[in-house]
Image (cartoon, rainbow, N blue to C red):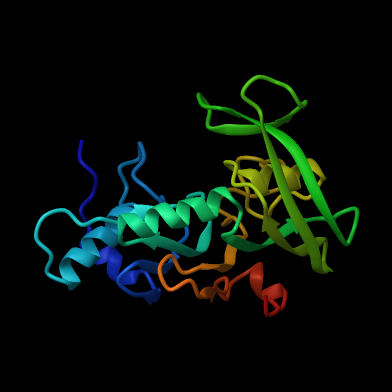
């Protein structure tokens, strides 16, 4: 079975910045970052199709994937348009020089107004779920993030998150581990969330050194103006 070739989907993806080396976009919610078993149109292939169409490029289009967002998560992402840019941006991810900031709406209130969370996470590839385990468990990987409470009301809180590692489902699992399940998270919060609610996690800021110009690039993306985001004021990050 081949993936859906809906080129029109790419035209709905906001482009925040583009030059010869990088492409920065706002990922739509519920779109896979790359092709998966669903065969739904994914962001990487949609952008390749869009570049091919806009620049009338023959043959295959190169576009390097250097970081990912979970399917239900929207927000800012950077892609590499050259192999040199891909290598340097991948190094920035590996050395934690690519700075990613998220906002999330969670149930309850974190135990501290700000803290660093460290957990060991293990992924069950059969069920595509992640769990917190003890340090030393086989195949477990350390996950680290900083969070800051931005506001609370009506049993929910707005939290800012800075990632230091990029583990699968990291934010969702680590916040659930401290009793702050994300709004709308059906996988890790089915007991407190209702079916059909959209996961309230957004990649709101991204900064990195341009792979060739060596200038610091900063980009910002705001969550959609819909509940539960409209219950809070998203600050400048």
Confirm whether residue 49 shows in the render: yes
Q: Is residue 237 left or right of residue 21?
A: right
Q: Where is the N terminus found, in terms of image quarters?
A: top left
Q: Position of residue 199 (x, y in %)?
A: 59, 55
Residue shown at the point (28%, 54%) measured from the top left: 45
Residue shown at the point (47%, 50%) measured from the top left: 71
Residue shown at the point (37%, 67%) measured from the top left: 22
Q: Position of residue 152 (x, y in %)?
A: 83, 67
Q: Name the residue nearer the viewer: 90 or 138.
A: 90
> What residue occupies the far left of the structure in this picture?
58
Which of the 4 image quarters holds residue 48? bottom left
Q: Where is the C terminus found, in terms of image quarters?
A: bottom right
Q: Is residue 220 left or right of residue 89?
A: right
Q: Position of residue 64 (x, y in %)?
A: 35, 53
Confirm whether residue 68 shows in the render: no
Q: Is residue 125 left or right of residue 159?
A: left
Q: Name the residue nearer the viewer: 157 or 82.
A: 82
Q: Position of residue 68 (x, y in %)?
A: 48, 51
Q: Is residue 70 left or right of residue 130?
A: left
Q: Name the residue nearer the viewer: 86 or 41.
A: 86
Badge count: 0
Residue shown at the point (47%, 59%) measured from the top left: 29
Question: Up-down: is 121 above or below 51?
Answer: above
> What residue occupies the far top of the structure in this picture?
138
Which of the 4 image quarters holds residue 163? bottom right
């Amino acid at each position: 079975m081949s993936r859906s070739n809906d080129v029109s989907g790419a035209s709905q993806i906001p482009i925040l910045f583009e030059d010869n080396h990088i492409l920065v976009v706002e990922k739509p919610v519920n779109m896979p970052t790359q092709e998966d078993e669903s065969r739904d149109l994914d962001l990487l292939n949609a952008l390749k199709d869009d570049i091919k169409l806009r620049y009338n490029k023959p043959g295959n289009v190169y576009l390097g994937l250097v970081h990912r967002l979970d399917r239900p998560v929207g927000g800012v992402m950077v892609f590499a348009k050259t192999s040199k840019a891909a290598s340097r941006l991948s190094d920035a991810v590996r050395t934690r020089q690519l700075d990613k900031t998220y906002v999330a709406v969670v149930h309850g209130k974190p135990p501290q107004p700000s803290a660093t969370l460290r957990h060991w996470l293990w992924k069950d590839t059969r069920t595509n779920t992640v769990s917190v385990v003890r340090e030393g468990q086989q195949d477990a990987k350390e996950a680290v993030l900083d969070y800051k409470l931005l506001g609370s009301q009506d049993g929910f809180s707005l939290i800012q998150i800075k990632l230091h590692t990029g583990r699968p489902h990291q934010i969702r699992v680590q916040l659930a581990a401290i009793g702050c399940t994300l709004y709308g998270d059906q996988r890790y919060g089915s007991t407190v969330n209702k079916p059909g609610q959209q996961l309230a996690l957004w990649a709101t800021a991204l900064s990195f050194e341009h792979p060739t110009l060596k200038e610091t690039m900063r980009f910002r993306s705001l969550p959609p103006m819909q509940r539960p985001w409209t219950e809070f004021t998203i600050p400048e990050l």
